[in-house]
Amino acid sequence: MTESSFNREEKSRLFRLNMQILADAFTSHYQNITFYAQNDRPCLEGIRLYKRGKSLNPRFVYLLQSKDVDNTFPEYKNIGFICVGHTDITCFHPSCPVIELKNSPDFLDAFEMVQETFAKYRQWDTHLQYALNSEHPLDEMLLASLDIFGNPMFIHNTDFYILSCPRYVQGMTVWERDSRTGHNMVPLSLIHDFKADTEYLDTLSKKAPDLFSAEQRGYRILYVNLWNGSRYEGRICVDEIQSELQKGNYLALEYLGQFIELAIKHKSLFSLSMGNDMDRFFNEYLDGTIGDNQRILNYLYFLHWKQNDRYLCLRLETEQRDINMLSAAATLGHIETQIPSGHAFLYRHSIAVVVNLSYGHSSASEVISSLAILMREGLLKMGASSEIHDFMLVPQGYIQASAALDLGRKSDSMTWCYRFDDYLLEYLLKKGREEIPPQLLCSEKLLLLKKYDDKNKTDLYHTVKVYLELERSILQTAKELYIHRSTLFYRLDRIRKIAGIDFEDSRERLILRLSFYILEQKLET
């Protein structure tokens, strides 16, 4: 009894609430609130009034009176309900999260409060979107989030430098000024305590938001770690000083973390601890201007990549080959969101991507498929290298990706991705034709046979072509040429005598097949 589910890509473009956030809002206004949930997905966009017989959509939570609940409700699955008044929770399917307002507040007041909660988070989401392109994105994101979490917040990197703390509150840690960089950082004494604290060390591997106990600081800290692929980059912290943390804060902090990670990647906000710019490194590496292999290995160590991991190189261009037509930062951000184990950067007026397939435990096909929507909507074309098993060969892999893109554009293919493996033959022949004319790359025997046909009005050249294409099958070749088998035997004998072709020699057969391809390519051009 639910409407069709909405597009997965659409779901990723805005913050969707779960029922826990609404339950937190009611708890702060009313007493005797009960929240039942075995399945609480972040999929809510708004509220609707329940109407019997109308199909329900999992994107909305439905407000109803307890008297509306009857024995038909088990038919609803994965639908959120807010019930005003005491109700029998067993009437709902277990997949449905339910908020029960037992003290029966005013029905319209409850509806208005839920609407205000959705509006609050929608406005917060909008502020995060705008902050991405601002001069100080981290400060603006945290400022916009203070009302959401009701507590002071800050961000630090792996070296405990404070990247953002827009509002200091009495009781927070007092930062120290690092004389070397001029930036605030966590006091060294506290850093040493953290490094000896088993609870803190355990938090470094967490992928989802979690709580740090009050033992170390005297108050609890809700945090989420920031990651670049599998590399820990720092964390966002919410100090429980001004108000009690809510369960719904976990979902909001996870969403905020995704925006912070994007801002950090594309504005080099972790350069304090890094000392090198990733884009500059990869540009120099593809240019071949890094002569020191140790520098390359040092950078691999920084990335937590290994020399013999599996790698994939991509080159992307617009249909008009003008990368300035795109919002480059947004495009790069989308790529790295879809491919966390890769790095996207501008290189010679194109977008280059180097992906570590080993870290993502993914295949080249999975990586390419993850960019399908971006490629279609942005009118982009992409060349993809073969899988590379040595980072030292990444520059050559990018050459493969570029060659595949160039050859693919010249073909009749309507696809948006051209893989080098599919254009290997064209590439080899193209490189050969750059130094030697096509007719000199072909078998002399085949050229001799072609001249004989032109002079004597025979069809021996085409006979050889069909015979080889059909893997030397007498029956199928005769059928394709509309001749009797005895006629085919006669022609093959004449071909042997005229051109000296040995059909039993596998190497000669390969040369003949390539010669046919080269001659046909020449005719097409």
Image (spheres, helix red, strand yellow):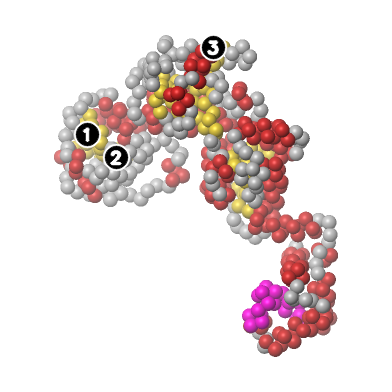
Q: Residue at x 66, y 82 (%)?
A: 474
Magenta span contains residue 486: no
Q: Quadrant of residue 309?
A: top right
Instruction: Say which residue label 1 marks.
Output: 100
Q: Residue at x 49, y 19 (%)?
A: 196
- Residue 32 shows in this picture: yes
- Looking at the image, residue 292 sits to the left or right of residue 134; the answer is right
Q: Are marks 1 and 2 in contact (CB under 8 Å)?
A: no
The residue range painted magenta reads 458-477
- Looking at the image, residue 422 sits to the left or right of residue 36; the answer is right
Q: Secondary structure at mark 3?
A: strand
- Residue 151 shows in this picture: no
Instruction: Say which residue label 3 marks.
Output: 176
Picture coordinates of residue 50, whole percent (x, y): 24, 42
Amino acid on which the number 2 mark rests in the picture: Gln
Near-viewer residue (272 or 525): 272
Q: Residue at x 83, y 56 (%)?
A: 435
Amino acid on which the number 1 mark rests in the picture: Glu
The circle drawn on residue 38 is 2
